[in-house]
Image (cartoon, grey):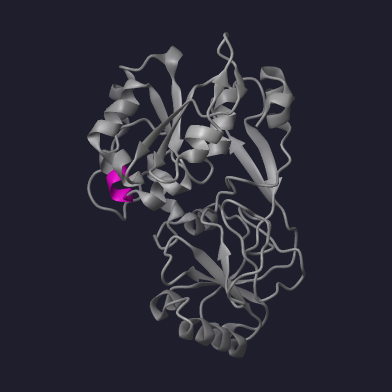
């Protein structure tokens, strides 16, 4: 699949990144990421595989990475505690796109892991056309995380013919339990949802949320309405590696649960067969908490299933950790 462009400018090409990599020392590769979202997961996995780590932080939000999860290594260079070797603290996450910071990343042989916060806090157009640091994964796919794009991950699901909850085009067609997904009016990085079992309930709940200033008429008009499918509550986190030469290329990393829809897709879930009018989840904590607004709940900001703190069962993590360092030293 080639680049799909709803942005502006020319995307940084493969040849330009290969030229950057020519100056890299393959024996000193460092894994870097934005200090938010799944950063601790990324760094924990990196140190298990023997890579030093670097986290780009925003001022006021650096303490977990620069202090509490700072890596301590023994004489042989193995981590005995923590997982963040270096933290760069910037005024704003957006500053990582500046040439000075990029040059610093390149000089440390950094391979950048673009978690969801990277594209949420930093301008996506600039990432595509001027961030000349090697990324793990495809730069062409970053825009699929933006749900309003024509070729979002919903488009990929359709092209791949993967089963997904039925989309309801018009509220008047609601004839059973549905979930309505849209952005918060003020906190644009938050995407929430409410449920309705009829057009009447949809109109009543949306009117209440509009009156309370939680959602806007504009966002409501663009909301995605999906049939709520009663089913498994699990979210399976897979990783596919085309360069794996010995074992299975597709690896199951973990299992967690989400409050969005109970369909087992890339996100999932509700413990009850009919969700109450509100649950509250976030990309850092998937434990349900009562919402301040009885008709509104926050969805995870990432559809990828890679939240920073998750309840997961992972075969890879425990075995790899036991080989690299005693379990008692894990923070």
Comparing 105 with 151, the one in front is: 105
State yes or no: residue 301 in magenta. no
Report the residue at 42% width, 78% height from top: 216
Residue 161 versus residue 229 in the image, above or below: above
The C terminus appears in which quarter of the rendering?
Answer: top right
Viewer-side residue, 216 vs 151: 216
Q: How many marks?
A: 0
Residue in the foreground of this view, choosing between 127 and 243: 127
Write the start and end of the magenta stretch as one range. 123-127
Magenta segment, prevailing SS (helix, strand or loop)? helix
| Residue 37: x %, y % from top left | 51, 46
User: Residue 105 location, x and y as percent?
Assistant: 34, 28
Quadrant in which the N terminus is drawn:
top left
The correct choice, above or below, for 91 with respect to 27 in the image is below
Measured as percent of width and height from the top left, residue 23 is found at 30, 17
Answer yes or no: is residue 143 visible.
yes
Q: Is residue 142 left or right of residue 321?
A: left
């Amino acid at each position: 699949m080639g680049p799909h462009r709803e942005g502006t400018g020319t995307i940084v090409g493969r040849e330009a990144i290969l030229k950057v990599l020519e100056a890299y020392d393959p024996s000193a590769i460092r894994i870097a990421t934005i200090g938010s979202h799944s950063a601790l997961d990324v760094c924990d996995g990196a140190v298990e595989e023997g890579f030093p780590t670097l986290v780009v932080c925003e001022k006021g939000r650096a303490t977990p990475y620069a202090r509490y999860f700072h890596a301590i290594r023994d004489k042989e260079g193995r981590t005995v505690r923590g997982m963040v070797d270096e933290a760069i603290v910037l005024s704003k996450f957006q500053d990582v796109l500046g040439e000075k910071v990029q040059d610093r990343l390149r000089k440390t042989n950094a391979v950048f892991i673009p978690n969801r916060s990277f594209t949420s806090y930093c301008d996506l157009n600039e990432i595509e056309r001027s961030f000349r640091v090697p990324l793990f994964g495809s730069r062409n796919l970053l825009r699929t995380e933006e749900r309003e794009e024509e070729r979002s991950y919903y488009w990929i699901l359709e092209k791949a013919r993967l089963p997904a909850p039925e989309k309801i085009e018009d509220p008047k067609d609601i004839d059973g339990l549905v979930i309505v997904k849209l952005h918060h009016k003020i906190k644009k990085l938050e995407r929430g949802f409410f449920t309705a079992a009829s057009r009447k309930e949809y109109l009543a709940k949306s009117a209440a949320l509009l009156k309370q200033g939680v959602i806007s008429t504009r966002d409501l008009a663009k909301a995605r309405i999906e049939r709520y499918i009663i089913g498994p509550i699990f979210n399976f986190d897979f990783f596919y590696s085309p360069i794996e030469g010995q074992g299975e290329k597709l690896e199951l990393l973990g299992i967690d649960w989400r409050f969005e829809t109970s369909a087992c897709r890339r996100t999932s879930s509700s413990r009850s067969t009919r969700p109450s009018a509100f649950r509250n989840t976030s990309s850092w904590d998937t434990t349900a908490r009562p919402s301040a607004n009885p008709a509104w709940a926050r969805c995870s900001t990432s559809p990828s299933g890679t939240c920073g703190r998750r309840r997961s069962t992972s075969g890879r993590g425990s075995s790899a950790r036991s080989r690299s360092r005693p379990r008692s030293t894990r923070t």
